[in-house]
Amino acid sequence: MEQTFEKLKHLQEVLSKRIEIENEMEEIPKALTVKEELLSRLQKSYIEKNDSKVASEEELSRLKKLMNDAERARETSEKRMDEISTQREYEALEKEIKVATEAEQEYRREIQKIEKNIEVISEMLSSEEELLSQQKTEIAEEKERISAIISEKEMIKNEMISEEKIISHDMDSEILFKFERIIKNKSGLGIVPVVGGVCSGCHMTLPAQFANDVRKGEDILFCPYCSRILFHQDSDKDMVTYDDEDEDEEVDEVSLSDLIDDDFLLD
């Protein structure tokens, strides 16, 4: 069993390294995701501004046509001034000229506002085009960098997996499955020593008989509190002998259910 414990310790180092690499591989693309989200927002903003510019240009075209119509109406009325013969005709024609002139001036003011708005939007679009181009370049470079890093880490990960297979080829598959899950959930520690009757993983005092069973080292035992695999390590406290009357000491089931998953409890 001592040899098995040594294998598990070695396997723990390899598994921890592999899990660390896998976590890094998951984290690396997150920076790219942030850049892509920014690019998406920039593209949305650009499209909205461009749509606004197109709508403004259409409105500008409509107003220019109306202004031209009002201008022609005014000019036509002015030419007719020489043809009138009565005061009533003069007053009616003068009113037509006034209405056409006012309409022409109003259209011109609206046209100037829209032209100014189009100018502002065009400047903003030009600025955002530069940002879009810059962001696309950064994303392309980031993708290339991430691809290189992940390829390198994938190579290391595969080396770890190969080493894991060599170490664990003759070990129980169920134990290995539990062991890997424990390492993932317990910050890389799946096998820890029992020192003076205390689990060094969770620092909980173990039942006396259970600690004695760990000391014997005849079976693979899991801590009833943190689920880690336990092995005995000598200490000054081990000079104390556990009495047989302590053998019936049991683990508080309520506290255990709060600390660990059922999957990790021993059958």
Image (cartoon, rainbow, N blue to C red):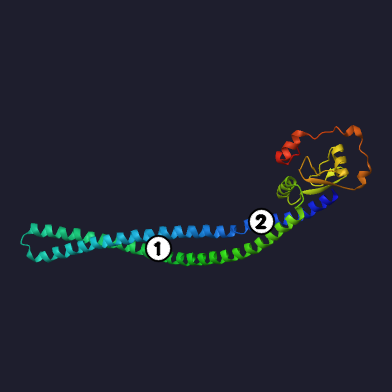
The quadrant holding residue 203 is top right
Apparent side of residue 127 relative to residue 90 in the rendered image (left or right): right
Q: Please, is residue 75 above or below residue 11 in the view?
A: below
Q: Position of residue 67 (x, y in %)?
A: 24, 62
- Residue 261 in sight in this render: no
Q: Residue at x 86, y 40 (%)?
A: 213
Q: Position of residue 180 (x, y in %)?
A: 72, 49
Apparent side of residue 53 relative to residue 185 in the rendered image (left or right): left
Tell me the quarter of the image containing the C terminus. Answer: top right
Task: Name the foreground residue: 261 vs 49.
Answer: 261
User: Residue at label 2?
Assistant: 22
User: Residue at label 1?
Assistant: 121
Q: Residue at x 39, y 65 (%)?
A: 122
> Which mark lies nearer to you, 2 or 1?
2
Q: Please, is residue 245 above or below residue 47 in the view?
A: above
Q: Amino acid at mark 2?
A: Glu
Task: Name the foreground residue: 206 vs 54.
Answer: 206
Task: Name the foreground residue: 137 vs 3.
Answer: 3
List the single residue furthest toward the front: 170
Q: Position of residue 89 (x, y in %)?
A: 8, 58
In three-dimensional space, the C-alpha distance between marks 2 and 1, rounded to whole angstroms, equals 46 Å
